[in-house]
Image (cartoon, grey):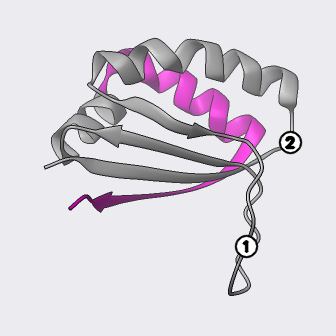
Amino acid sequence: MSVYKIVDVKVSDPAKYEVYKSGVSSLIAKHGGEFLVRGGDFEVLEGDWQPSRLVLFRFPDRESVRALYADPDYQDLRALRHSVAETSIVVVDGV
């Protein structure tokens, strides 16, 4: 069953975040992930949530998401993201 990874990211250093973005794309694909939303305009219809930048991925399963996080090639990129952005991430099962 597909899972969806939903990310709300507040970027503090756009130039360094571009380095992260360029490096992470191939790793996401390596683990079966694909971008469905990568930034762009959004509209809050209800509630108080005010996302900064939304990113939505589809992965084949949770194991694929975990494999991305455990991938040795992702560790430096993850550290870079942590240094230039505040991130909230959830994974949810598809239907």
In the picture, the quarter occupied by the C terminus is: bottom left
Q: Position of residue 21 (x, y in %)?
A: 63, 22
Q: Residues within 10 Å of mark 1 (few under 14, many from 20)?
A: few
Residue 6 at x, y percent in the picture? 48, 54
Q: Any magenta on residue 73?
A: yes
Please tell me how many numbered marks the rendered image carries: 2
Q: Secondary structure at mark 1?
A: loop
- 14 lies left or right of 67: right
- Choose top left, top right, bottom left or bottom right for residue 59: top left
> Which residue type carries mark 1?
Val
Looking at the rendered structure, the kind of residue marked 2 is Ser
Where does the magenta region start and end?
71-95
**Residue at 72% in and 37% down:** 83
Badge 2 element? loop
Q: Kindly identify the residue that appears in the image at 77 percent across and 71 percent down.
A: 50
Q: Which residue lies under the disc numbered 2?
A: 12
Q: Count residues near mark 2 (Cα–Cα under 10 Å), then give few for <14, some for 14-19, many for 20+.
A: few
User: What percent of the width, then of the height, locates residue 63?
Assistant: 17, 41
Callout in the foreground (1, 2) = 1
User: Residue 68, how many percent across, how many down?
Assistant: 32, 30
Picture quarter containing residue 82? top right
Q: Earlier in the sequence, mark 1 or mark 2?
A: 2
Q: Compared with residue 24, is residue 78 higher up or lower down, i.e. above or below? A: below
**Residue 92 location, quadrant:** bottom left
* Magenta-colored stretch includes residue 77: yes
| Residue with the mark numbered 1 | 44
